[in-house]
Image (spheres, helix red, strand yellow):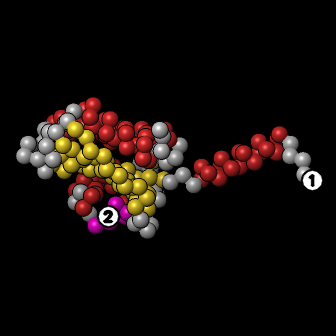
């Protein structure tokens, strides 16, 4: 029978953690986009809220240890901005993700039906196969900073990270 020492157990644990760290998906996040199907015009408040969601998602992915964000260089960001929206570009997100060295592409949309009814959608897909690895939508009520923040926070905690 083999005797495993404490040092051997520590080495096995470190090796397992290192192997798992190598499996962490590298994600190119292309931001959120507002889809306004309401009768109200878009305003600066919505632009602020889109930026707030972008920052919240980046922060949560970075801090989770489950994903590694890959930065989008300015020249690629400019090319993306000059083309169609990521949510409707027929797979360009996969090409962009591979260009920056990411295995996954991620983007989101916020559909504003009215100032009372909105939904936040998040998509994460394998850049090689195009398979959606995560896709979720949450409905929110009221067009406020707080409702947008809580909507994305809820989605991330309960669906992406599986927290209670």
Task: Report helix, strand or loop for mark 1.
Answer: loop
The answer to which quarter of the image holds residue 118 is top left
Residue 97 coordinates in the image, percent (x, y): 40, 59
For the record, the magenta segment spans 90-95
Residue under the image location 28 percent in, 67 percent down: 90
Q: Is residue 34 visible?
A: no
Which residue bears the numbered disc 1? 1
Task: Report helix, strand or loop for mark 2.
Answer: helix
Task: Tell me the distance, in whole angstroms, between the alpha carbons under discs 1 and 2.
Answer: 56 Å
Residue 16 coordinates in the image, percent (x, y): 68, 50
Residue under the image location 20 percent in, 36 percent down: 142
Q: Of 4 and 70, which appears nearest the observer?
A: 4
Left or right: 93 in relation to 143: right
Q: Of 76 and 109, which appears nearest the observer?
A: 109
Which residue bears the numbered disc 2? 92
Residue under the image location 65 percent in, 47 percent down: 17
Number of residues whose C-alpha sits closer than 10 Å to that of mark 1, classed few (under 14), some (14–19) or many (20 or more): few
């Amino acid at each position: 029978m083999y005797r495993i020492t404490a040092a051997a157990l520590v080495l096995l644990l470190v090796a397992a953690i290192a192997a798992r760290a190598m499996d962490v998906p590298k994600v190119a996040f292309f931001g959120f986009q507002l889809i306004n199907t309401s009768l109200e015009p878009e305003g600066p408040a919505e632009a602020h809220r889109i930026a707030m969601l972008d920052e919240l998602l980046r922060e949560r992915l970075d801090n989770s240890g489950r994903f590694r964000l890959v930065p989008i260089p300015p020249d690629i960001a400019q090319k993306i901005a000059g083309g169609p929206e990521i949510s409707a570009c027929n797979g360009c997100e996969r090409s962009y993700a591979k260009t920056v060295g990411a295995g996954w592409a991620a983007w989101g949309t916020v559909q504003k039906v009215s100032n009372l009814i909105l939904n936040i959608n998040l998509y994460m897909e394998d850049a090689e196969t195009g398979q959606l690895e995560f896709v979720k939508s949450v409905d929110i009520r009221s067009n406020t900073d707080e409702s947008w923040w809580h909507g994305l926070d809820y989605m991330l905690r309960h669906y992406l990270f599986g927290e209670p």
